[in-house]
Amino acid sequence: MVQKLIPMGLSYEELRARYERYSQRHQVTAGYFVDQVRMAGAVLLNHEDRTELAVQNTDELIAASAIISGFARLLSEKLILLDGRDLTNGGSIEIDR
């Protein structure tokens, strides 16, 4: 994964530009994640904003986090398999297990 984000042989300027894009995406994604945790833990944290995913106790929050983590891993695997592909050369993106 790191080799896709930072290929060998980049100039300093290219590396810096990639890092800045990554850093900006990290900040936006972290904010989204924090918002989702706040909504999921609304009952526990006594927040007014509540969603269908709001949990009643920490065990439910831990379970929801584990489930989300699994989905995020699966999405990452699928996206890596799609890298460089389009409708003309896509083939199968099934993961052999």
Image (cartoon, grey):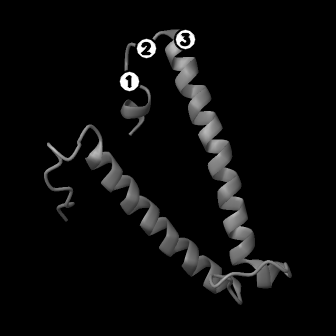
Residue visible at 13% across and 51% down?
91
Q: Amino acid at mark 3?
A: Glu
Residue contact at pointers 2 and 1, CB within 8 angstroms? yes
Question: Relative to residue 19, is residue 86 depicted above or below?
Answer: below
Numbered disc 2: secondary structure: loop
From the image, tell me which residue sits under label 2.
10
Foreground mark, 1 or 3, reads 3
Q: For this rendering, which residue is in front, 26 or 57?
A: 26
Residue at figure coordinates x 79%, y 83% from the top left: 44
Q: Name the image quarter holding the C terminus.
A: bottom left
Answer few, some or many: residues within 10 Å of disc 2's Cα (few below 14, many 20 plus, some between 14 and 19). Answer: few
Please tell me which residue is depicted at 43% across the width and 67% down the height of the picture. 71
Is mark 3 in CB contact (under 8 Å) with mark 2? Answer: no
Q: Position of residue 3 (x, y in %)?
A: 37, 31
- Measured from the top left, where is residue 16 in percent x and y? 58, 19
Of 85 and 46, nearer the camera is 85
> Which label is found at residue 7?
1
Residue type (three-letter) at the residue carrying disc 1: Pro
Say whether marks 1 and 3 touch (CB < 8 Å).
no
Q: Is residue 49 left or right of residue 28?
A: right
Reading the image, the residue beneath label 3 is 13
Left of 90 or right of it: where is 22? Answer: right
Residue 42 or residue 1, whichever sits in front = 42
